Amino acid sequence: MSQDGDQAKASVSASGVQAKAILGLENISNNATGELSIQGDALVFKLADGRIVRIPIGSIQGVFLSQEDKEVGGTPLALGRAATPFGGGRAIGLFAHKKYDFLTLEYLDSNGGLHGAICQLNKGQGQAFGSELETKGVHVSGLKDDAGPETGDKK
Amino acid sequence: MKLSRGASLKVVTAAIVIGLSALTVPVLAGANRTGVAQWSVVVNQVDPGGSSIAPEFEIAIYENMLDELVKTKQFSAVLRSGDRTADDVPALLILKTTVESYTPGSETKRAVTTVTGATKLKVRSQLCTREGQVVLERVVDGNVRFIGGNLRATHNLAHNVANAIKQSSLPEPAASVHPL
């Protein structure tokens, strides 16, 4: 993975999808928003300020797709919900959620160290992006159906 | 009472010395308390154990663990699983994390009902030497009950593991060379 300058900026095509880097992308703060795309033999995350993170597709060990509910509206809506009387906040909470696709990557750096990264995409984009990665020879699992199964155990 | 110029200078100097010593004593005590600054640690990939933990949670635990261990400043280096540079590190500990239980939650359920939808994680963390000697073992949990996304449980868990390591006293590197 590397951060490149103007040369890399120029090579990024407009075919990417809007994504949020939840965690794990090196030199990118958590929850940063940018554009995720596949450029030749690399997965590219481009921030709004022009910074670029490249992950060589050959270094990707696996990709897992999943789907999850997330609250929309951020802190203002959360405060609004808390301030709504007569339990109205709960009713708002019921509708203030949206489904997102999650793309989980496992890749190796030049020293062989394992990295993991999680990106949040809009619903439906995860499968399309995963399929594109699959054509490049990356092992992709999860989210074949519309609604991914919720797994877990209780002990 | 009026002090001479020389006397007041002495008073100010004494005050500065006392202030500085008060500041440095806890810092030195913290450094000597465990003596683990010579250790480096390599964080192994999370073992799902018998649980069916989602891969994004495994990765989030692993990445958050790396971040939190760096923040503790207890280790001279925090290395990733598989990092070849770990071979040259003399005093190396290996952090193994095994998931004991995982209960997936729902942010929507938490928002609507408050009492349901909690995401719960419980892991067994072991710090081992290269020879396999376990120097620290803790069962730690991380939950999200009210506010925050489901992945926040992994951040809480990693924070708790790092805290457990920080509060424990690890042996000196030379004393732990021989296995059990």
Image: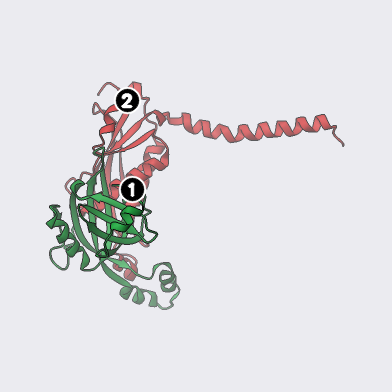
Chain colours: A green, B red
| Chain designation of label 2 | B
Q: Is residue B158 left or right of residue B100?
A: right
At horizontal 85% and vertical 34% (from top left) the residue drawn is B3
Residue at image mark 1: B64
Residue A72 in the image: above or below residue A153: below
> Which quadrant does the N terminus of chain B fall into?
top right
Q: At 29% across and 22% down in the image, what residue appears?
A: B177
Q: Is residue A153 above or below residue B69?
A: below
Disc 2/disc 1 C-alpha distance (Å): 25 Å
**Quadrant location of residue B166?**
top left
Q: Residue furthest right?
A: B1
**Residue B14 pos. (x, y %):** 71, 31
Q: A84 or A2, which lies in front?
A: A2
Amino acid type at mark 2: Pro
Quadrant of res A153: bottom left
The answer to whether any part of residue B39 appears in the image is: yes
Which is more N-terminal, label 1 or label 2? 1
Instruction: Report crowding for label 1: few under 14, some 14 to 19, many 20 or more residues within 10 A (C-alpha).
Output: many
Amino acid under label 1? Asn
Q: Position of residue A42 (x, y in %)?
A: 23, 52
Residue B128, can we see it? no
Q: Is residue A4 left or right of residue B57?
A: right
Q: Residues within 10 Å of mark 2 (few under 14, many from 20)?
A: few
Q: Nearer the viewer, mark 2 or mark 1?
A: 2
Per the image, the residue denoted by label 2 is: B90
Residue B76 drawn at (x, y percent): 39, 33
Chain letter of the residue carrying label 1: B
Q: Is residue A107 above or below residue A125?
A: above
